Image (tube, coloured by chain):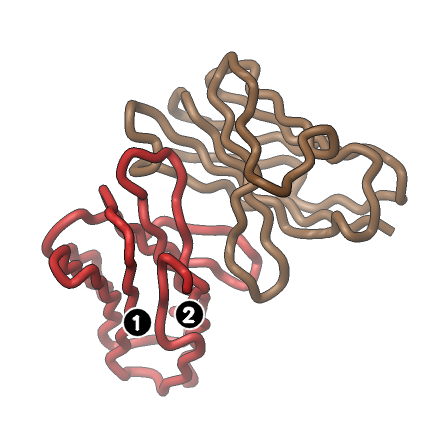
Chain colours: A red, B brown
Amino acid sequence: KNEVEQSPQNLTAQEGEFITINCSYSVGISALHWLQQHPGGGIVSLFMLSSGKKKHGRLIATINIQEKHSSLHITASHPRDSAVYICAASIQGAQKLVFGQGTRLTINP
Amino acid sequence: GAVVSQHPSWVICKSGTSVKIECRSLDFQATTMFWYRQFPKQSLMLMATSNEGSKATYEQGVEKDKFLINHASLTLSTLTVTSAHPEDSSFYICSASWGSRPGETQYFGPGTRLLVL
């Protein structure tokens, strides 16, 4: 079992829908990252959080440390949000990130 | 925000040649750089971690003689794929970080797509 699990693996929705992507982890972490990878390959860091909730535009990320669970929400989704979303955990005491498998999101017009 | 660049973005080479990929932090000093490899429709796989001025730490299963990493300055790390073969074709991504907790502050480069013929 992976240390970081994402669901769903694939998600297709219509423009305007509210999107939720989930991430569960089984290890002690110091922070959790949400990353976005567009078809061209480049990776953009969306959020880094260790507690509570963060919001940036139409994107919201939450984390529940007790439940070892994080969610990424997209409100009023748009076709340009189509990308792969990856959660990654900063492991306590380690330099490296552990990545989830990614969620491929497709928003249809 | 912190910017990381990679060069080249695309490279096609013949089997047996060596290819060098550069990763630069443009507006900060990166004490730690990470090199990742990504196969199609898969997540990132960490290859090695390099700290400025010291030898890189390779992940299990990554050949250090095959993938040479040099982190000679606080703004530049290079990955050289030596004697490249078609199975080395992949998407290579670097990330750069600073501070005492580099796992928490990683900024990713745009990636380099390598095709070995």
Tag 2–tag 1 contact (CB < 8 Å): yes
Q: Which residue is at a point 42% across and 35% down the rendered structure image? A: B3
Q: Label 1 amino acid?
A: Ile
Q: Is residue B104 above or below residue A41?
A: above
Q: Residues within 10 Å of mark 1 (few under 14, many from 20)?
A: many
Q: Are marks 2 and 1 on the same chain?
A: yes
Q: The residue tagged with tag 2: helix, strand or loop?
A: strand
Q: Is residue A6 left or right of residue A63?
A: right
Q: Label 2 amino acid?
A: Thr
Count of number-bearing discs: 2
Q: Residue B39 location in percent, x, y? A: 63, 58
Q: Which residue is at a point 22% across and 74% down the rendered structure image? A: A75
The one of B34 and B26 positioned closer to us in this rendering = B34
Q: Is residue A41 left or right of residue A4?
A: right
The one of B82 and A56 positioned closer to us in this rendering = B82
Quadrant housing the N terminus of chain B:
top left
Q: Residue A9 location in percent, x, y? A: 43, 75
Q: Which residue is mark 2?
A: A103
Q: Which residue is at a point 68% across and 52% down the rendered structure image? A: B90
Q: Residue B20 location in percent, x, y? A: 72, 31
| N-terminal label among 2 and 1 | 1
Q: For the residues marked 2 and 1, what is the alpha-carbon distance in whole angstroms?
A: 7 Å
The one of B19 and B28 positioned closer to us in this rendering = B19
Instruction: Name the chain letter of the residue that bears numbered label 1.
Output: A
Q: Which residue is mark 1?
A: A21
Q: Is residue B112 left or right of residue A82?
A: right
Instruction: Name the chain letter of the residue that bears numbered label 2.
Output: A
Q: Residues within 10 Å of mark 2 (few under 14, many from 20)?
A: many
Q: Which residue is at a point 78% across and 52% down the rendered structure image? A: B87
Determine which of the numbered discs, if any, sits on residue A77 in the image: none
